[in-house]
Image (cartoon, rainbow, N blue to C red):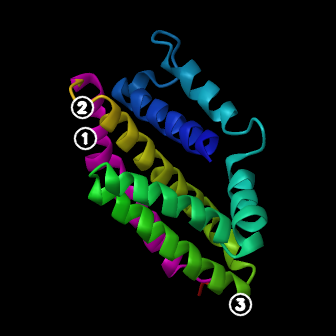
Amino acid sequence: VLKAAFTHQAFHGGSDCLQVFGGHGYVREWGVEQHVRDARVAMIYEGTNEIQAIDLLVRKVLADGGAGLNALLAELEADTRTAGNAPAADALHALQQATTALAARCAQDATLAYHVADDYLRAVAVGLLAWAWTRIAAAAPAEPRWQAPARAFRSWVLPELAMRLGIVASLETTHA
């Protein structure tokens, strides 16, 4: 899950950096172009990110109707809530509900999983990272170097979970 999330973000972050240089793009002056190429290749290593997403959803999550992942998410939600991060705990709870709903929808139409796998994987990744940043912030309450990125995660990344779950909930297999 995190391999796919991190390599996806690295590629898009590198691409954004290239845009800062305007017309320089893939010119060798800055070295950014090599980071973009490396990040793109990393998305393919150990199976493409899309294959990883399908494997997560079809072979792992749906194999038991989401019970295994939901058990883990319930533990992470409780841990996150105990640490006082209600937004992250609420997001983990929403992910559990979405997993249950998605399992029911996929039981009716197995092809749906292939349409939503990438967005679902990204939602799971954000949920796992929300828990991790909560733990980091709780372990170092007086350390600004850890508190600042934890706050940035809550403000800038955590909202992506709701967006991804919205996409998963709205997708259908037949697109007119």
Residue 151 located within the stretch drawn in magenta: yes
Secondary structure under the numbered disc 1 in the rendered image: helix
The residue lying furthest to the top in this view is 29
The region drawn magenta spans: 144-172
Gap in angstroms between the C-alphas marked 3 and 2: 47 Å
Q: Amino acid at mark 2?
A: Pro
Compare residues 14 and 66 and report the one nearer the observer. Answer: 66
Give me the residue at 68% from left, 48% from top: 49
Closest to the observer, 54 or 86:
86
Q: Main secondary structure of the magenta part?
A: helix
- Can residue 103 be found in the magenta stretch? no
Query: x%, y% of residue 14?
Result: 48, 30
Q: How far across and down, in percent of the image, does residue 170 sit?
A: 49, 80
Question: Callout 3: few (<14), some (14-19), or many (20+) C-alpha neighbours within 10 Å?
Answer: few
Of pointers 1 and 2, the one earlier in the residue sequence? 2
Q: Residue at x 69, y 32 (%)?
A: 41
Q: Nearer the viewer, mark 1 or mark 2?
A: 2
Q: In the depicted view, which residue is nearer to us: 134 or 26?
A: 134
State yes or no: discs 1 and 2 in contact (Cβ < 8 Å).
no
Looking at the figure, which quarter contains the C terminus?
A: bottom right
For marks 3 and 2, the one nearer the N-term is 3
Label disc, if present, on residue 151 of the rendered structure: 1
Q: Secondary structure at mark 3?
A: helix
User: Callout 2: 10 Å neighbours few (<14), some, many (20+)?
Assistant: few
Q: Nearer the viewer, residue 43 or 110?
A: 110
Q: Which mark is residue 108?
A: 3
Mark 1 to mark 3 CA distance (whole Å): 40 Å
Residue 141 image label: 2
Residue type at tag 3: Gln
Element marked by disc 2: loop
